[in-house]
Image: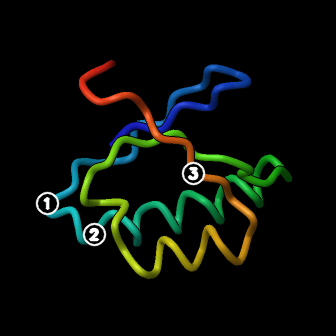
């Protein structure tokens, strides 16, 4: 899993996920770490229509924190 900050172009290679279900746990730890280290909030996420994002906990986190979902065009890098 790689997360890229669009503003600074910093890339964060977090880990290799054994299953898509473990995505939320890794993302949540990253989300809290970024908030604490950089004192910033994540405001939007660009994502594909992958199954790792189709998680009730992920949707609740985004809804509660005002994180917008932007979808990438299929089959683009």
- The residue where tag 1 is placed is 18
Task: Name the residue located 43 percent from the left edge and 32 percent from the top edge.
Answer: 72
- Label 2 environment density (alpha carbons within 10 Å; few <14, some 14–19, many ≥20): few
In the rendered image, residue 23, in percent from the top left (x then y), is placed at: 33, 63
Q: Label 2, secondary structure: give it.
A: helix
Q: Which of the two discs, 3 and 2, labels the residue nearer the N terminus?
A: 2
Q: Is residue 71 above or below residue 62?
A: above
Question: Which residue is at the far right?
Answer: 39
In the rendered image, residue 31, in percent from the top left (x then y), is placed at: 61, 60
- Label 3 environment density (alpha carbons within 10 Å; few <14, some 14–19, many ≥20): some
- The residue where tag 3 is placed is 69
Q: Is residue 57 above or below residue 35?
A: below
Query: 49 or 32: which is nearer to us?
Result: 49
Task: Name the residue located 66 percent from the left edge and 47 percent from the top edge.
Answer: 44
Q: Which of the two discs, 1 and 3, labels the residue nearer the N terminus?
A: 1
Task: Name the residue located 42 percent from the left edge and 81 percent from the top edge.
Answer: 56
Q: CA distance from mark 2 to mark 1?
A: 7 Å
Q: Label 3, secondary structure: give it.
A: strand
- Label 1 environment density (alpha carbons within 10 Å; few <14, some 14–19, many ≥20): few
Question: Given contact means CB atoms under 8 Å apart, are the residues at marks 2 and 1 in contact?
Answer: yes
Q: CA distance from mark 1 to mark 3?
A: 24 Å
Q: Label 1, secondary structure: give it.
A: loop
Q: CA distance from mark 3 to mark 2?
A: 20 Å
- The residue where tag 2 is placed is 22
In the rendered image, residue 20, in percent from the top left (x then y), is placed at: 21, 62
Tell me: 60 left or right of 19.
right
Question: Given contact means CB atoms under 8 Å apart, are the residues at marks 1 and 3 in contact?
Answer: no
Quadrant the C terminus occupies: top left
Q: Is residue 26 above or below residue 34?
A: below
Query: 19 or 12: which is nearer to us?
Result: 19
Q: Quadrant of residue 41?
A: bottom right
């Amino acid at each position: 899993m790689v997360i890229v900050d669009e503003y600074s172009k910093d890339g964060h290679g977090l880990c290799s996920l054994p299953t898509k279900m473990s995505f939320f746990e890794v993302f949540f730890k990253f989300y809290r770490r970024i908030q604490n280290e950089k004192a910033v909030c994540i405001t939007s996420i660009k994502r594909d229509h992958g199954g790792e994002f189709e998680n009730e906990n992920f949707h609740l986190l985004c809804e509660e924190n005002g994180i917008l979902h932007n979808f990438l065009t299929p089959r683009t890098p």
